[in-house]
Each structure stands twice: as structure tokens, then as C-alpha cells.
Image (cartoon, helix red, strand yellow):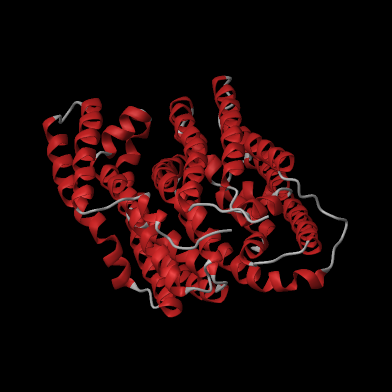
Amino acid sequence: MAKHHSVNRMLGWSAVDQFFRLGFQFLVGVVLARLLTPSDFGVYALLAIFVGLASTLANAGLTDALIQRDVTTHQEESSLFFFTITLAFLIAVTMCISAHWIASFYEKPILVDITYMMAICVLIGSLGSVQVALFSKQLDFKTTAIIGAIAAAISSIVALLAAFSGWGVWSLVAQTFAATVISTLLIWFKHPWRPKFIFDLKLIQPYLKFGGYLLISRLINVVSINLYTIVIGKVYTAQDVGIFNRASNFQNLLVNSMSGIVAKVAFPVFALAASDHQKLERGLNKALLGTVFLSVPISISLVILAKPIVLILFGNQWVDSIPILQILGFEALIWPLHLLNVNLLMSVGRGDLMFRGVLIKFFFTSMMLLLASSYGILVMAIAFVMSSYINLMVNIYFTKKVFDYGFIKQIRAVAPCLLAGVPTIAVMYLTRTVFDSQYLMQLVVCVSVSGLIYLLAGAFLRIYSVQQFRSIIGLKS
């Protein structure tokens, strides 16, 4: 049965999902940052690359291939399901076998048991992968939003109870485990799809071609993103890892809560219009304008207000993360462009271009890390941001190859947002100077006054973030 979805409605439910999941994550993160130590967060972050690689391998890019294809059969979906869970089981076993090696590499015996728990999470999470893909394919963001909200709420409560009980780093493990189990159970409860006991490798070979490129690309991306954590964890201390990751995670949380609203919708919606390049370009223009309009004030706030943000929210034990957060604020500005350029390539099935781009980006990221690793985590943060800007140019280069949608067109699309940010910077800096040592007043007054200026500048420049998506023509399921 045909069912029409306005883009505005999809964005609304995507926003609800992001608000509850990331909102709970933010609030709980603030409390946990005061109950736990930077070393606790650092120890947990040491496993990020291994969990990321395992989760990516378990998915194998097949669910994204499922979204990208217009028509799929139940036999194909069932074959994908059994292939995915078998792969996830093998990866979970590999993680368990590698647990002692991981702990020995970082000289942290506690990582053995934590690795076992993360392996279980990877296996459980794979059980709902096909249903999640079908929800996205059907543009049913309402259900996934509700599931995400419930899982976030319960897992957050679990983490807080564990932290108050003195569990330390295990509070973070408990949060991840609870969120994985609850979301998987709810996905199975809410989606009527059930696998048939059918497995035919021939049926999923077309998926493997698209998913294969995507899988390798994502594996390299996971390594690139977590290279800094590996080096800091090995060369420096778990506390340094915690300091760096606290700043990085807070920045990612703010940016993903905004750009993720659109990015989650972008891939399936763009995939529906993949045969109409003009329609895709209009949609990408509007998506870029909307997300950058949100990322500009976030970036400005992180750079100018990092000190009051850290001291008020997380406390004095995180003071060393202030300059790192300021540096990473410059990356927050461009993250929406990363997401939407990648989603555009995914929507037309150009996994080959994504793969080539990832290889180039991995080279630059590795070189920047190699040059910065001997000079401390502050210089490494600068190198991280510089490599991110280089990587964006690579993404845009491949987008231009497919759609002639290059750097000039994208800058022209987001120019009003950048212009609106100029008076916002001036007002925020002046306001912060007035309340120099009053951190709470800095945060409240700067955000409210400069936020008002930014909205007025946006109105003057005729920027309408959500309304931009309402005029995308013909996007129906």
C-alpha cells in the first residue's frame, strides 16, 4: 500500500529520535563525568576501535545495500539475515579470543572482561539489522524514534544506578549492554518481518558487491577515526585518552544531534530520487543549508565558550579538555558536509568511489597523526582537525565526479549560514568578556544573546532551516 510521507514529517520523527537518544546521552554523560574519572572513560574508549571494527564487520554493509535497492524479496532478506548473524557470531568469537591480547597491548587487565561484554553486544545488535534497514526503507522514522527513546531512557537509568553504586568503568559497559538488548527486543516486537529458514548465497551476491565496497570503506574509516585513541592510549595514559575522548564525544554529541536529524533521513530519501540528478542536487542544497545553519552556532560556542561549558557541566577534573574542545570546535562546522556528501554517494550506489576516497583520506589521516604524535594530545587535536578538512575536500571531489556538485556550489549553498555567523561571533566574544569570571552568566547570557542575533541574521538572510526541506519535489515512498 502506497503511503505518502512529507520530508518535514520524517525530519520531525528523526529529530525526536535524536533528541531522546542523544539528549539522554548528554544528560547522563554530564552526571557520569562527575561520578567517574577521566581514566574510567579512557579505559572504556580504548576498546572503541575494536568494537567499531566488529560492529562494522557484522553489518558488512548489507543493510545499507538493502535500503539502496528498490525491490527486495523475502528470500533475499532472510538470506541477508542469516548471513549477518553468522558473521556477527564469528566476529564475537574472534573478539573473545583476542581479549587477552588487547588487554596486554594496553596493559589493562580489566579490558579482558569488558571485551567479552562488547562481543556479546555485537552479536545481539546484529539480530535486528534487517528490521532496522526495512524501517529506513519504508521511511518509518516514527517507530525507530520511539524505540530509540525507550532504549536511551532505560540504559541511562542503568548507567546512573551503576555509577552511584561504585561500578566505575562498568557503568559505561552496562549502559551499552542495556541499550543494545532493549533496542533489539523492541525492534523485533514492533516490526512484523520474520526470517524464513532460507539461505541462498546467490540471492545476496548483488548486495555483497555494493556492501563489500561500503564495508571496506567503513572499516578504514573506523581505523582512521580511532587511530588517535590507539596512539594516545599506547604512548600516553588512559587519563589522556579520557580527556581527549571527553572533548571529542561532547563535540560529536552536539553535532550529531543536529546533523544526524537530516543525515538519517537523507540516505533513504535521496535513494528514492537517485535517478533524478537535478532533484538530488536540490535536495542536497537544502539539506546542507539546514544542517550547517545548525552547526555554525555549535562550532562558535565550542570555540568561545569551551571553558564555562566544561567547568559547569563536567567539573574541574576535566579542565585539561578545554583547549582540545576549542580546537575540535572547528571540525564541528564541517561535519554536516561530510555526512551529506557521503550519503549522496551511497544513495546512487557508488561504493567504489567511497572506497577510493576512504583510502586517500586514510593516508592523510595517518600522515598527520605520524607528524603530531610526539608533541602531545593538543597538537594531535590540531592534526585531527586539519586532516578532517582535507578529508572533506576528498569527499567533495568524488561528489563532483558523479553530479558536478563541487566545492563552489556547496559553499554557495551554505554561504548565508557563514555570513550569519559573523555578527554572532562578535556578540558572543564581547558578551563573554563582560562576564569574564562568571562562568554561569557567560554561558546563559552568551548563548541567549548571541543565539538571538544569529536567528535575526538568519531571518535577514532568508534562511529557513526546516522549511527548506518542504519544497523538495516528488519525494514519496
Quadrant containing the C terminus is bottom right
Q: Is residue 107 above or below residue 277?
A: above
In this rendering, does residue 376 appear at all? no
Q: Nearer the viewer, residue 446 or 475?
A: 475
Q: Nearer the viewer, residue 56 or 452?
A: 452
Q: Nearer the viewer, residue 407 or 462?
A: 462
Q: What residue is at 31 percent from the left and 34 percent from the top? A: 309
Residue at the top extreme?
Answer: 165
Image coordinates for residue 320, horizontal then vertical, percent: 33, 39
Q: What residue is at 58 percent from the left and 22 percent from the top? A: 161
Q: Is residue 94 left or right of residue 169?
A: right
Q: What residue is at 44 percent from the left and 75 percent from the top? A: 398
Q: What residue is at 36 percent from the left and 63 percent from the top? A: 285
Q: Is residue 348 above or below residue 312?
A: below
Quadrant containing the N terminus is bottom right
Image coordinates for residue 159, horizontal then vertical, percent: 57, 28
Residue at the right extreme?
Answer: 197
